[in-house]
Amino acid sequence: MKRLLMGNEAIALGAIRSGVSFVTGYPGTPSTEVLETVAKHNDGSIYVEWSVNEKAALEAAAGAAFAGARVMVTMKQVGLNVASDPLMSLAYLGVKGGMVIVAADDPGPISSQTEQDTRYFSKHAKVALFDPSTPEEAYTMIADAFAHSEKYGSPVLFRPTTRVCHSCASVEILDNLPKIKPGGFIKDPGWVIFPRLAYANKFKMTENLKAMSEEFSDYRYNSVINITPEPCAISKGIVSGGVSYAYTLEVLYTEATCEEDKENIKCKLLKISTYPFPEKLALRFLQELDEVLVIEELDPVIENELLRLCGTHHLNVKIFGKGSGHIQIAGENSPDTIMKAIKVFFDNSGNSEPVTAGSPASSHSTIPSLPVRPPVLCAGCPHRASFFAVKEASQRANGKRAVFSGDIGCYTLGNAEPLNMVDTCLCMGAGITVAQGLQRIEPDTAHFAFIGDSTFFHSGITGIINAVYNQSDIIVVILDNSTTAMTGNQPHPGMGITMMNTRPDKISIEKIVTAIGVSAIVKVNPFNQKKSKEAVCSLMQMKGVRVLLFEAPCVNIKGSSAGDQRAVKIEINADKCTGCAACVRKLGCPAMSLADTKVVINSSLCTGCGLCIDLCPAGAMHVI
């Protein structure tokens, strides 16, 4: 049977087929749908949770793996930074059950702060990594990852990238593998990581890496193929991995069948899908070659391994790639960019120039570019009301300069005009601690730190404790919209629901910050602009760590008061509208625009939040 699956769905179903019994993670694009798909297809035999952060997810999964269960942990590449502490130690300590850590990389980056390459993390942590190039491959490869983890008693990284995660393919659904019953936790001093144990295990890890490299040289997803089937002298080769391999294969076979290029496109193609690097396979590939082009996304990981091999074995082979400028050093590859790089590589005229390092390769496509659509807060988003209240009130409060430290979430979009309310954004939870540093250097400035409810539970609590303990003078603005909105409305501890569909008591943000000992807490609905601005002005007159808790549900939550407002709209009386456009200029709501000197409202977008009504100096707006 075949099913059309998104790559993330294929990974999840592949894990279920492999007998996974414990799945944890933290939502983050492009990885989110992996855990959600496991939960959707859970027959009750799999424990699934959204953990409060990636560190907690990996540590909980480690406990289950110590007891012999097959476990999977899901996150995006920046989430691996949060989980790196337990990962580094787990590599030394080892696991009993198979552990696969799905860390989805985001070339571009499309929805991330950084362009990180998890392959380097694999090398740094001294653990194996599997790098699928298609959804079909991801479905079967994850079973190999579990088996590999159990064979070597070590966690394994699984690295799909955005296009593998979110592309769809027809995947053949295979029978489930025999399920391995966890043997249970057996007490042993080896589960306690002491320096002496770490020292001894370092030797074991190094030997394992050598054995893995040998094994991966014969692994089915590491392979060499000839693009020209007829016997001929081949002096050029191409090496690729991940989704770049799929693009490369497509381009090579397209070009090899074109009459004008048929004579030029003669090469061997090496596919690399794993770390440790399969050295024996690569050495066999390099024999009798003069030039090799390496096509990969993010960092030159394969390229550097080949350069090292050529140096170690004194091979006179020229390696081209990111270092030579033939492959762009940032952003995603595409069939178009790869086609250009391959044409340059096979051009024997000597006139072709490589792609300029640092700039994307030009496209061969005649399709016009899509218009740029900057990301914006949704119409009716409570964050817009929160930002607007703080902006208006802080500008009026004694003329004191204000700095707004932001965080990771939907509300990061508050940096755009006309709100312009996010001055800094570093990483999850850093808004609160960055504000502390700013306040120490500029004590006469009003310092606000914005953080969402999910991010608060993820890594914001530590920052508030640090601020209270060190007697900082900041206002922490917690934007509680009752969900993890940016990644698709996943539950968190403040919502009273889990991925196992149980209903625990909601964890109160207000009670947490009260227990920490903040000097003042004010709770308000941001759509009540009068009370919201009064709250901001009141807190600005105080000292110490103060918390302003804005509570209003995400407009996209079904059944919420905000969601129910879809039946309520705002209408403009064109006769009263003066065309001053104060509402458009100050709010930036996507439901509002200016047409023929009059403001118009797109009724299909308007949610009836009413934020614009009090803002209109002409009183031209009313609710219908």
Image (cartoon, helix red, strand yellow):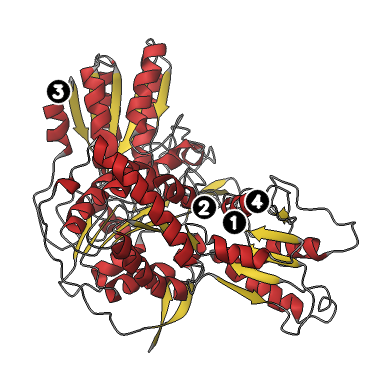
* Amino acid type at image mark 3: Gly
Q: Quadrant of the N terminus?
A: bottom left
Q: Which residue is mark 4?
A: 307
* Amino acid type at image mark 2: Ile
Q: Which residue is mark 3?
A: 517
* Amino acid type at image mark 4: Leu
Is residue 380 in view?
no
**Mark whose residue sits in front, 4 or 1:** 4
Compare marks 2 and 3 and give the one earlier in the sequence.
Answer: 2
Residue depicted at 28% across the width and 16% down the height: 472
What is the CA distance from the residue labelled 4 to the residue labelled 2? 30 Å
What is the CA distance from the residue labelled 4 to the residue labelled 1? 23 Å
* Amino acid type at image mark 1: Glu
Left or right: where 618 falls relative to 296? left
**Mark whose residue sits in front, 3 or 4:** 4
What is the CA distance from the residue labelled 3 to the residue labelled 4? 56 Å
What x and y, as percent, mark residue 114? 49, 43
Compare marks 3 and 4 and give the one earlier in the sequence.
Answer: 4
Q: Report the disc number at residue 110.
A: 2
- 193 and 130: which is toward the camera: 193
Q: Report the disc number at residue 332.
A: 1
